[in-house]
Image (tube, rainbow, N blue to C red):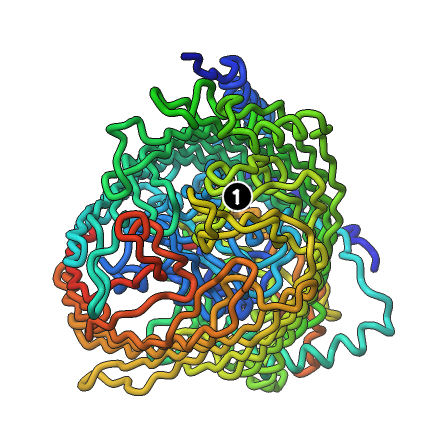
């Protein structure tokens, strides 16, 4: 263990100086031959640190190209991964769920940054700010994710990357991009996108812009057009990156605008959503470790009212406005301590300010004379710190152990109903009770994760993870207060038509998850693989609902909807996800044929009520055959969803029937162009997604209540060009 | 008709906070840039000065070294899943290039005098011309173990392209004796990552007695 001393060091120092003086000859000892080992390739899409390659699923750009024009809804595209479902919502805003945990229980990051939801109906979730045409890759972690990947969540993670920086090789310049346009026959949807990068070896500028629009879509079979399913969206962003001796700097800013989006399973529609953001990121690699610093700010203005299908705004409608400012700083430091150990330490601070008010409507007895103040300048501050130790005991065995603490502070101001008339009495009493209470909340949440990865051979891998994670209630779960039938129905993201009331006394949810996976074969491209992943999650203080009463219609008769209040209950989820793929054909003459099978079974139970939980996916499976040969590629997909018979009686959840959908697609590539034509729901099957919610838009117009019909047959065409 | 207005000051607070953070970031840059100097280019002295005189890395106590050998045998037989080459399809970037030896066409000589040893013809299987009898298979296996150990600790990419070549020498016990940057990738950050990867992969398994030849190696890191 002695240090190098004496002659070798002197020789080295001599050479050090010698190198600075051009013609100085080096001693012969250093002129011997060195054996060159094979190169190590390092890809920029390498697995996230702390996670084995088998622990995440990746949807990359080629897969998104094949999906082409089928959907403008990123939340729906991620459902390809086993274990991932999505609550139906507007055509751009599906709310993903992973293994039964929905929405804000899972961590959704866009370019490394979380996006706060600024709507009492969660109409603008993080994935609605992304467009499938401009996404570079989506990583989905369905099992346990390490604490270094975020806090204040209890489930998996969805990580979307839109415009990673790209640099040219030394001395060169890089100009490349992709332009695309699409048309969808069902709903007359169309749109386009452009991504362009211009870079030299030190600077990079990337522009990303997309536009999508669609009218109402038609359901399959005998279903007609589904009301309130139209939308339009535009996104633009500019990302500037510079790599210097000190590190990699990125500055990204963008603007998002949705002029309208109908929500078939909500009472309201989105009539305007504008959001701009600025994100700065610094990444440095030093001899002692890596530094990753991200700072972000986002400003969102969101407006709701009625689109034409729900009556329009000629009589004033019911305007509802939400404003959010979010800011955050995240610092992650990674220290390789030895051949075996890496230490990751980090801290995060996030600030959210939210204001939600409903302006009065002229001439309305109920909606006036004042503004209804739903959330008065609520603040949620969260300070997270984590420590994680990754040990590579051998090439086959890795452990990642981490602990995390999140401090959450919340507060909000006083509220006010529309007025003090007789029709508003429920809200008047509720506002008085709310204002009399203390709104300050402080949660001290401790979380931990342990992940083991054992890969004895290249064709066998075991993953086992345990996590204890804690999530604080959201602003809307804690601070909404309206008890009137109308006010309560304005709250809720469940698509069920029920009314929801917040609860100041909510405690954070505490989840214990055990998740494992066995992978046979290799998930590297070109190999077969089978992955079986069982899991069990128990959530203490799970925020579900208790029923306060039934909502009655104007004549006092029960309407079929209920008034519910958020409350801490207890829940358990367990199930298994299976993913398999195999290459059936691979030759130059007959092409390549790959089969992919996924299956997912899950069981979610409310242990306090001894009832099933709301919106749990029944057994579902999919089979996809991908064929490619030369310039041609083709695809056949079969998706099956079983009957949903386990429903939540508290929310009057409807049953849905089983269905199978067939899709067909063909693509042709030529000189950078790609033309894709595909048909989704080939047999025009009429169906309703188990997580689609109730069709309230149709209910209001026709008086007939039914689950939201799924999309009927659609011919989708996409033309794209890489340059 | 009254209309509720949110306080105007609140609208600016978040933006001020983020601009302040950006300013702090800029301050960090201003402090770090003079330390790190200009971006590294092939030809800059910076590449030359990267020779690091290493203190011996913390070696685990002797008893632990024994069992550490056994897993390394496994490593040789069974490269980690991510390193498996796929012979038929174009290898995905993360699968490495086991079995394919990159021939450095022309070593870039940035400035005369840089301590770049002239590259031998790439040949782990090539018999050493020196007289002592060598087991070529043993040397090839040892080289594969070295490479696998380094590749197992490779960092994630940074979206910066470049190839950095690191030269290192081992002592007969497998500890790292010298470490130098033989060829810069053009980015000081990638160079640091490459050097750090080899340094944290040490100590390496001791070379077998019949390995022959010297213990100088070089390895390239191709960042995409």
The answer to whether A57 is drawn above or below residue A592 in the figure is above
Q: Which residue has dot 1 on it?
A: B189
Image quadrant assignment for residue A253: top left
Left/right of residue A448 with respect to residue A299 in the rendered view:
right
Q: In which chain is the residue bearing label 1?
A: B
Residue A201, relative to residue B211: is it above or below? above
Q: Nearer the viewer, residue A150 or B91?
A: A150
In which quadrant of the rendered view does residue A385 lie? top right
Q: Nearer the viewer, residue A380 or A571?
A: A571
Q: Quadrant of residue A100?
A: bottom right
In front of the other: A680 or A199: A680
x, y percent for residue A227: 25, 50
Can residue A212 be seen in the rendering of this structure?
yes
Observer-nearest of A347 and A334: A347
Q: Residue at x 66, y 25 (%)?
A: A435
Relative to A557, residue B68 above or below: below
């Amino acid at each position: 263990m002695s240090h190098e001393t004496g002659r070798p060091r002197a020789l080295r120092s001599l050479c050090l100086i010698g190198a600075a003086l051009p013609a100085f000859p080096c001693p012969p000892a250093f002129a011997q031959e060195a054996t060159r080992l094979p190169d190590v390739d390092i890809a920029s899409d390498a697995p996230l640190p702390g996670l084995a390659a088998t622990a995440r699923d990746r949807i990359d750009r080629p897969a998104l190209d094949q999906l082409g024009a089928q959907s403008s809804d990123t939340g729906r595209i991620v459902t390809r991964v086993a274990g991932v479902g999505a609550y139906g919502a507007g055509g751009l805003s599906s709310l993903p769920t992973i293994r039964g945990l929905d929405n804000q229980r899972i961590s959704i990051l866009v370019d490394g940054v979380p996006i706060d939801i600024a709507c009492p109906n969660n109409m603008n979730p993080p994935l609605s700010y992304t467009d499938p045409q401009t996404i570079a890759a989506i990583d989905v972690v369905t099992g346990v994710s390490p604490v270094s990947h975020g806090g204040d969540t209890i489930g998996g993670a969805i990580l979307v990357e839109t415009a990673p920086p790209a640099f040219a090789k030394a001395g060169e310049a890089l100009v490349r991009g992709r332009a695309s346009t699409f048309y969808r026959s069902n709903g007359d949807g169309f749109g386009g996108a452009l991504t362009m990068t211009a870079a030299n070896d030190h600077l990079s500028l990337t522009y990303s812009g997309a536009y999508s629009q669609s009218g109402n879509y038609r359901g399959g079979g005998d279903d007609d057009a589904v009301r309130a399913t139209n939308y339009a969206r535009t996104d633009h962003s500019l990302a500037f990156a510079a790599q210097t001796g000190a590190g990699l700097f990125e500055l990204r800013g963008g603007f998002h605008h949705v002029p309208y989006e109908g929500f078939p399973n909500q009472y309201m529609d989105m009539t305007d959503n504008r959001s701009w953001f600025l994100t700065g990121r610094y990444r440095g690699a030093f001899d002692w470790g890596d530094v990753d610093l991200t700072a972000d700010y986002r400003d969102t203005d969101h407006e709701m009212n009625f689109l034409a299908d729900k009556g329009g705004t000629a009589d004033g409608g019911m305007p509802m406005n939400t404003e959010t400012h979010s800011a955050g700083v995240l610092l992650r430091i990674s220290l390789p301590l030895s051949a075996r150990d890496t230490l990751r330490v980090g801290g995060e601070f996030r600030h959210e300010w939210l204001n939600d008010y409903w302006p009065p409507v002229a001439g309305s007895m109920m909606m006036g004379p004042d503004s209804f103040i739903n959330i008065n300048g609520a603040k949620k501050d969260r300070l997270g710190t984590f420590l994680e130790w990754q040990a590579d005991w051998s090439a086959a065995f890795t452990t990642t152990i981490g602990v995390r603490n999140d401090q959450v502070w919340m507060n909000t101001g006083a509220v006010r109903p529309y007025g003090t008339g007789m029709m508003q009495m429920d809200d008047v009493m509720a506002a008085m009770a709310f204002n009399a209470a203390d709104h300050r909340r402080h949660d001290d949440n401790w979380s931990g994760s342990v992940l083991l990865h054992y890969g004895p051979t290249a064709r066998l891998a075991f993953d086992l993870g345990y996590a204890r994670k804690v999530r604080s209630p959201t602003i809307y779960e804690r601070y909404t207060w309206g008890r009137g039938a109308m006010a309560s129905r304005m709250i809720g993201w469940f698509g069920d038509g029920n009314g929801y009331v917040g609860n100041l006394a909510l405690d954070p949810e505490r989840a214990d998850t055990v998740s494992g996976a066995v992978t046979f074969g290799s998930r590297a491209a070109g190999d077969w693989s089978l992955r079986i992943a069982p899991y069990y999650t128990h959530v203490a203080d799970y925020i579900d609902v208790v029923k306060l009463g039934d909502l009655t219609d104007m004549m006092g008769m029960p309407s079929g909807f209920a008034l519910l209040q958020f409350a801490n209950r207890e829940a358990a989820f367990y199930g298994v996800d299976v993913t398999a793929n195999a290459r059936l054909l691979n030759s130059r003459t007959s092409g390549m044929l790959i089969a992919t099978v996924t299956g997912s079974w899950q069981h979610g139970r409310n242990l306090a009520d001894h009832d099933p939980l709301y919106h749990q996916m029944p057994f579902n499976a999919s089979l996809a055959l991908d064929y490619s040969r030369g310039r041609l590629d083709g695809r056949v997909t079969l998706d099956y969803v079983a009957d949903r018979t386990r429903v939540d009686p508290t929310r009057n959840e409807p049953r849905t029937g089983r269905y199978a959908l067939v899709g067909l697609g063909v693509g042709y590539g030529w000189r950078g162009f790609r033309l894709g034509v595909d048909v989704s729901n080939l047999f025009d099957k009429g169906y309703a997604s188990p997580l689609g919610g109730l069709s309230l838009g149709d209910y209001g117009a026709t008086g007939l209540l039914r689950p939201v019909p799924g999309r009927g047959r659609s011919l989708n065409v996409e033309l794209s060009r890489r340059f | 008709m009254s209309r509720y207005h949110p306080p105007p000051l609140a609208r600016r607070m978040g933006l001020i906070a983020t601009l302040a953070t950006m300013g702090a970031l800029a301050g960090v840059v201003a402090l770090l840039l003079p330390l790190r100097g200009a971006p590294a280019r092939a030809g800059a002295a910076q590449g030359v000065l990267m020779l690091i005189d290493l203190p011996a890395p913390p070696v685990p106590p002797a008893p632990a070294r024994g069992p550490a050998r056994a897993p390394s045998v496994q490593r040789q037989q069974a490269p980690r899943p991510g390193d498996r080459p796929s012979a038929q399809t174009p290898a995905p970037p993360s699968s490495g290039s086991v079995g394919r030896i990159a021939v450095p066409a022309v070593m870039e000589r940035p400035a005369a005098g840089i301590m770049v040893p002239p590259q031998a013809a790439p040949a782990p299987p090539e018999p050493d011309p020196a007289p002592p009898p060598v087991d070529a298979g043993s040397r090839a296996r040892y080289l594969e173990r070295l490479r696998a150990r380094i590749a197992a600790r490779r960092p994630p990419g940074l979206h910066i392209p470049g190839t950095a070549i690191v030269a290192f020498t081992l002592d007969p016990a497998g500890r790292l004796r010298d470490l130098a940057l033989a060829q810069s990738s053009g980015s000081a950050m990638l160079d640091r990552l490459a050097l750090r990867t080899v340094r944290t992969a040490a100590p390496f398994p001791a070379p077998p007695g019949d390995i022959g030849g010297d213990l100088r190696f070089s390895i390239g890191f191709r960042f995409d």
